[in-house]
Amino acid sequence: MDGEEAHNLPMIVVVMGVAGCGKTTVAARLAERLGCAFQEGDALHPPENVAKMSAGTPLDDTDRAPWLARIAACIDGWRDAGTGGVVTCSALKRAYRDIIVGDRDAVRLVHLAGSRELIGLRLDARRGHFMPPALLDTQFATLEPPEADARTLVLDVGPEPDDLVEAIVAWLGKGKVPR
């Protein structure tokens, strides 16, 4: 597929970052703003992963494989249907991003980045999620931050979520936004 064809496809946005960085809040608001589908990536975890994280045990690459495959399948489903969408995924390693983004030209990546201190405070305040704050250090240790480029936007999580959404919409610019 050449660049012109990719430019005319509906975009799919993957919002990534460590636990507690605001992926769900920003991604849900972005999908609403763009009028497209939203998928919470955590909802695609197999029950075994949820149980493992709930017990305070970090996931390894083998644990993440079926989860990443489900996220990739969600993205491919949107692509096959000719629609766009917004999905969350920690996508901590380049190898994980290769699975979910790979050579899918219409997929854009937004990395919500912030300090360990700020994200730790947010994670400590979060209630009702299976990911315990104790695993945040393992998330930062695993994180291989992506470089900003034509398909990747890196945003500091300090601003309000609506400001982050507007920055993403502006970055998407003249590309065909998800529908």
Image (cartoon, grey):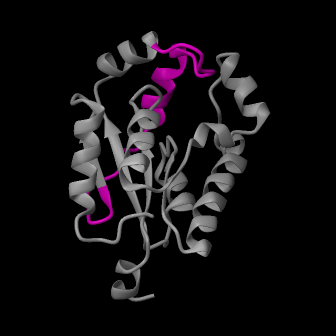
| Residue 94 drawn above or below residue 8 | above
Quadrant in the picture for residue 116: top left
How many marks the image carries: the answer is 0
Side of 5 where 75 appears, left or right: right
Q: Is residue 127 magenta?
A: yes
| Residue in the picture at 43% in, 55% down | 35
Relative image position of residue 132 (x, y in whole percent): 57, 16
Q: Nearer the viewer, residue 83 or 99?
A: 83
| Residue 162 drawn above or below residue 119 | below
Relative image position of residue 69 (x, y in whole percent): 67, 55
| Residue in the picture at 58% in, 43% down | 41
Pick the quarter of the image with the C terminus: bottom left
Q: Nearer the viewer, residue 177 or 64?
A: 177
Relative image position of residue 146 (x, y in whole percent): 35, 51
Quadrant in the picture for residue 148: bottom left
Range of magenta residues: 126-152
Side of 30 where 163 appears, left or right: left
Relative image position of residue 133 (x, y in whole percent): 51, 15
| Residue 10 drawn above or below residue 6 | above
Pick the quarter of the image with the N terminus: bottom left
| Residue 177 drawn above or below residue 64 | below
| Residue in the picture at 63% in, 51% down | 68
User: Of all residues shown, which one is farthest toward the right?
Assistant: 48
Q: Nearer the viewer, residue 144 or 36?
A: 36
